[in-house]
Amino acid sequence: MAKQKTNYTCTECGGITNKWAGQCPSCGQWNTLVETVVEAAGNRFSAQHQGLAQTSPVLSLADIEAIDVPRFGTGIEEFDRVLGGGLVPGGVVLIGGDPGIGKSTLLLQALANMSRIKKTLYVSGEESGAQIALRAKRLALDAKELQLQAEIQLEKILNTLAEQTASCRHRFDSNHLFRCIDLCTRISGAGA
């Protein structure tokens, strides 16, 4: 049987350390560390990876009520068909594929259409505003209502989103270029 893993928790400040010491390294108080047993991690799907929702039981597909939700059309009939009738409010759609197959062009067309009805923001992490404007002109799109931000720093993008209204549609192009300086995190993927 494997040895139980223990930590030492300070009774004064709640600080945790792996090794016992006479003085708490967090608050400096003496003789306040108490040994606590750490629960076994189990497997890679254990408590440390739990989602926000409760675990659902295994059900027969026939026992699950399928509730259709309202969708917002993109103005591109075939794209809306693939999306099941359009975009779901609050949903996320990942468009992937090889470079040059038209992901950005398709989504520029969809956003130009949607911007005529709702406030829409296009965030590009790879192409400049001039490149996107040139593509819109080449495609003869009516995109004068479409808002654009060419940015790769996640903090700046989040600030822009915070300034936008709740009714704004957001589109991110080339997520793999976004970088969060504070978290040193890279988000991988194509367009989302």
Image (cartoon, rainbow, N blue to C red):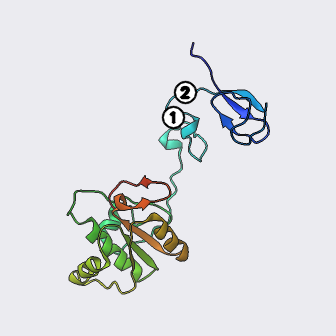
Horizontal placement of 126 versus 182: left or right? left
Q: Secondary structure at mark 1?
A: loop
Rendering coords of residue 4 (x, y %): 62, 20
Residue 122 image-quadrant placement: bottom left
- How far across and down, in percent of the image, does residue 38 sit? 64, 28
Q: Residue, x 49% and y 54% (percent of image)?
A: 183
Taking the spot 24% from the left edge, 81% from the top edge, the residue there is 134
Disc assigned to residue 162 = none
Question: In screen coordinates, is 61 left or right of 152?
Answer: right
How far from the left and from the top, in percent, is residue 173? 34, 66
Q: Nearer the viewer, residue 10 or 163?
A: 10
Q: What amino acid type should be assigned to the residue bearing mark 2?
A: Gly
Q: Closest to the observer: 55 or 103?
A: 103
Whether residue 88 is visible here, answered yes or no, is: no
The circle drawn on residue 45 is 1
Are dots 2 and 1 in contact, CB under 8 Å? yes
86 up-or-down from 1: above or below: below
Could you classify mark 1 by the number of other residues whose Cα lies within 10 Å: few (under 14), some (14-19), or many (20 or more)?
Answer: few
Quadrant containing the N terminus in the rendered view: top right
Residue corresponding to mark 2:
42
Q: Position of residue 103 (x, y in %)?
A: 27, 65
Residue type indicated by callout 1 = Phe
**Residue under the point 76% across and 42% down:** 13
Q: Which quadrant of the structure image shows residue 81?
A: bottom left
Q: Is residue 37 left or right of residue 29?
A: left
Residue 170 makes an appearance in the image: yes
User: Residue 21, relative to residue 132: is it above or below?
Assistant: above
Give SS at disc 2. loop
Residue depicted at 49% across the width and 32% down the height = 44
